[in-house]
Image (cartoon, rainbow, N blue to C red):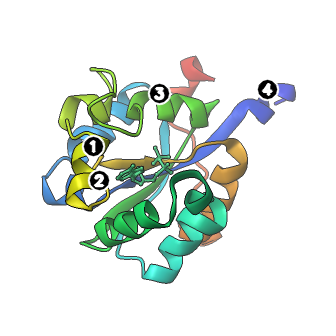
Amino acid sequence: MGKEKDLIQRSLVVCKPDAVQRGLVGEIVHRFERVGLKIVGMKMVMPDEEQYKEHYEGIGEMITRRGEEVFRYNLNYMMTGPVIAMVLEGVEAVPLVRKIVGSTEPQKADMGTIRGDYAHMSFGYSDAKQVGVPNLVHASGSPEEAKKEVALWFNEAELYDYSDLNEKFTR
Ligand code: ADP
């Protein structure tokens, strides 16, 4: 492989507590698999508050972007149950996965995206109710964040290098 290998990226995807509790994990994974993204790691976990603080503020700088109150609502939401974490690999996978997931506010997310198809809540409603908006999936925002998030959530031994049958045509 030459220069093109720099365009193979890994993204951290988390099926959030609402996705797990609504039984939507299969639907979500299917959408990533059908475009040919490769699952290189996957597990069910229930991270503690420290890990979520590192994920959303240490790496994601969420307090600066969204404020302390929304940060706290979001932590409470994420702590409501176990999640399915996975690492997906493919050509420029980080922006591709974000496109499949859709924008943060479900009501504004395009139809055809995971957040647009399986949720409809607005920020206005979630903020009035003082909850983090349940939007089913987390996906890394940039390649730099993806590297840090994958290292936070997965050990090297939990990530696998293998060839899949799509690669003849997808790489
Ligand atoms: P994204 O997950 O799309 O990268 P952010 O990192 O900005 O978005 O926010 C993290 C999570 O916090 C969102 O996915 C969502 O669940 C929740 N959230 C963000 N903004 C709000 C808001 N204004 N009201 C309620 N929840 C929010």
Image vertical order of residue 112 relative to residue 154, above or below:
above
Going by the numbered disc 3, the residue's amino acid type is: Lys
Near mark 2 (Cα within 10 A), the count class, few <14, some 14-19 or many ≥20, is some
Image vertical order of residue 65 relative to residue 47, above or below:
above
Near mark 3 (Cα within 10 A), the count class, few <14, some 14-19 or many ≥20, is some
In the rendered image, which residue does mark 2 sit on? 127
The disc label shown at residue 124, or none? 1
Q: Secondary structure at mark 4?
A: helix
- First of labels 4, 3 by sequence position: 4
Q: Position of residue 85 (x, y in %)?
A: 41, 60
- First of labels 3, 2 by sequence position: 3
Name the residue at 20% across, 38% down: 119
Q: Left or right of 123: which side holds 38?
A: right
Query: How far separated are the C-alphas under marks 4 and 3?
Result: 21 Å
Name the residue at 47% across, 27% down: 99
Q: Secondary structure at mark 1?
A: helix
Q: Secondary structure at mark 2?
A: helix
In the rendered image, which residue does mark 4 sit on? 4
